[in-house]
Amino acid sequence: MPDTSDARALATRLAGLSDAVLADALAVRGIAPSVNWHDYFDAADGLLDAASIDRSLHRLPRSVLTALHAGVPIPAEPGATLSRLLLADVDGLPYQAVSARVTEAAAAHPEAFIPAPTAATPEPSDEAQCAASAEHVFAIVATLADLLLASLHAPLGRTGAGTVSAADRRRLVEAGVLDAGDDLDDLIAAAVAAGLAHSAEREWVADAEAETWLRESTTSRWRLVAEGLRDGLPPDLRTPDGGYVPLPAWADAFPLDPDWPTRTAQALRIAEQWTLVLPDGTEPPWARSIREGGEADTSTLAAYLPAEIDRVYLQADLTAIAPGPLSPPLDLRLRAIAHRESRAQASTYRFSADSLRSGIIDGESAESIRSFLSELSLTGIPQPLDYLIESTANRHGRVTVGTDAATGRTRVDTDDPQLRDTLAIDQALRPLGLVPDQDRLTTRAHRDAVYWALVDARYPVIAVDDDGAPLPLRRRRASAGDGSAAANPYDRLIATLRSGAGQDDDADAAWLVRELEQAVRARAVIAVAVKLPDGSARTFTIEASGLGGGRLRGRDRGADVERTLPVSSIVSVQPVA
């Protein structure tokens, strides 16, 4: 029978953890929420199982593996990592089962348990390299902006492997967001690291922070992503001052993890994509401060970038020409009412009834569009464009959707009787349950649902408030954090553990029974200390054979007789070698 002192200590420790800490520990250990554990003793046995420990060793960095194998004290932070993984006790000392598996792993992979060579600090890039990489910064920031804009309107499909779906990949390429789909997954990974997007079920969804990021300057956009990439690195790639180790050292950080080469390859691609390092291994000056743990040196980067402009040329052919990189907030608003046809340091935008209609749906009006374009244009507003703005806005307001104060029902109004009749019989709107009510249509459906149904059916609709004033509505997908918090997948398992043995004052008795059950299953020879009626104690060496009715049965090795001992009188159990 193996020594169970570690398992008992771990079971006691598990019982003292909060639900949140216990759920985190189970998650980082990769324990399935459906595992068949009934109490903390089962959990301790499962966590100290050889296969479970081996999977956790794969998550440990080289520095911790080396210290474990050498038997030297574990530094504070890695020691906390071991404790969080439940591979070590609260003092950071590894459990015996863990030490045994480390010895086995070191024999099979000795190269993983020796210190990695020190990587050299990268050489600084020269002027020509800085100029070329700054152009790349401009391009990659603009590409991510296009990607986030696209995902704000329609989340991107996510495959089981975490990549963007082939259909959305093709859609983005056809829309000119990307020249090719090869870099798409790396762009998504960078956005997630910067807190601009997250995965929700089978989709990649832009966060609310993405809209703020889109209004930042090019240098601020780059800084937020670059610092997010640094801050999201595993702790073993970080330095004490908050920076990160030179990139050549990344590949050796987690030598037992079979997935690490793939993850490292992507991390290095993204680092090069965002100019933390250049293809030849040199480092541009604006990346040095990030590597050293400080704020990004955006002033140096800005010196290599073309100056942003705040004016465009509006033309009679319904286009706008930006002779340089347009300031991001202006570009963002212009793209809400016009389709960008070309993307470069000089860009072309085209107005159409559909593009203006999209802007009006998002809250613009003829007056706000004219005011914006008057301030933006170096050439005034051409007559053809002014006419298009007026006609689109006039047509757009022919149908209004509001809430009737008296009944609480949603009302749909229009001055055109023929259009009202069309709405009433439109099969696409049938789920709304529109019914005639004098000179309007009403429904029990919510105002926002009715409005977006009419928008999707391409009717010229606006929402209005209780006073009849236009009310801008924006369609946004709920973030994963909206509404009530999702149930933790480990809630059921933790509840089972809490209700099992090892939680209350009978934990010692429950553990004793468990030791006896294991001894019986293994037909183990154990030393059983029994308290006699006179208060004295006696130890029997027994080959355990049965347990039931509150009694332990087995052959006494000393007297060579069968004995039956009451479990309530047993004080302790120890294995006999």
Image: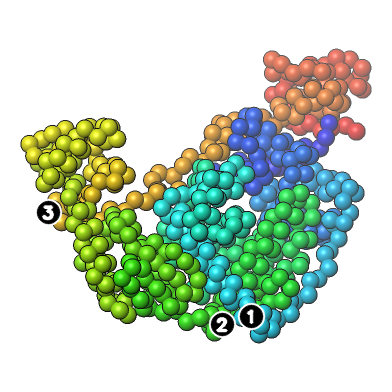
The answer to which of 307 and 519 lies nearer the viewer is 307
Image quarter for residue 251?
bottom right
- Residue visible at 27% across and 58% down? 360
Left or right side of 557 for 344: left
Q: Which residue bears the numbered disc 2? A: 304
Q: Nearer the viewer, mark 3 or mark 2?
A: 2
Dot placed on the residue nearer the N-terminal end, 1 or 2: 1
Name above or below for residue 575 compared with residue 373.
Answer: above
Q: Position of residue 97 (x, y in %)?
A: 80, 43
Left or right side of 208 for 93: right
Q: Which residue bears the numbered disc 3? A: 467
Determine the CA span between mark 3 and mark 2. 52 Å
Check disc 2 and report its element: helix, strand or loop: helix
What kind of residue is marked 2? Tyr
Determine the CA span between mark 1 and mark 3. 57 Å
What kind of residue is marked 1? Cys
Q: Can I make out residue 460 in this image?
A: yes
Q: Which residue bears the numbered disc 1? A: 130
Q: Nearer the viewer, mark 1 or mark 3?
A: 1
